[in-house]
Image (spheres, rainbow, N blue to C red):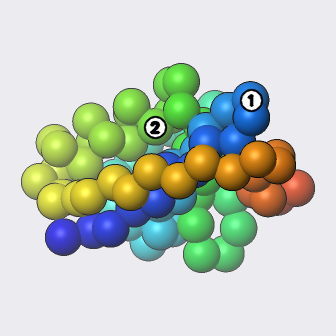
Amino acid sequence: MLNLTYTSDPSHGYLAVPIDTFRTLDVYLSEYSFRDAKFVYAEEDFDMPAIIAAMLEHSVGHYIREVSIDTPHPCRTLRRC
């Protein structure tokens, strides 16, 4: 079971997916998602649903924990996908 975190800030939300898991899913992400060496932060409107659909297609069991923060998500300072 893959434990993921969806974090929403005052204006948007992002699903953090381990980079190794993301690479096995073969999903194209928009320029509105971010990444670092450990995670892809998939934006909530288009990229997050695409990743969830790919996980279901590849039978990747997952649980999504939801978190809300009051400041801009730190991923916004990272490299775009």
Q: Is residue 57 above or below residue 20?
A: above
Q: Is residue 54 left or right of residue 30?
A: left
| 59 vs 57: above or below | below
Inspect this view and state whether residue 31 appears: no
Does residue 56 show up? Answer: yes
Q: Residue drawn 17% across and 44% down?
A: 56
| Mark 2, secondary structure of its residue | helix
Q: For marks 2 and 1, give the one nearer the viewer.
A: 1
Q: Residue at x 58, y 66 (%)?
A: 39
Q: 10 Å neighbourhood of mark 1: few (<14), some, or many (≥20)? A: few
In the picture provided, is 19 more to the left or to the right than 70?
left
Q: Position of residue 60 (x, y in %)?
A: 18, 58
Q: Which mark is residue 68?
A: none
Q: Going by the image, does 73 lie left or right of 51?
A: right
The single residue placed furthest to the left in the displayed view is 59
Q: Which quadrant holds residue 74?
A: bottom right
User: What is the crowding at mark 2: few (fewer than 14 residues within 10 Å), some, or many (at least 20)?
Assistant: many
Residue 35 screen position, x and y as percent: 68, 59
Kind of element beneath mark 1: loop
Residue at the spot 16% in from the left edge and 42% down from the top edge: 57
Residue furthest to the top: 45
Q: Which residue is mark 1?
A: 11
Q: Amino acid at mark 1?
A: Ser
Residue 41, x across and y down, in percent: 60, 52
What residue is disc 2 on? 48
In the picture, the quarter occupied by the N terminus is bottom left
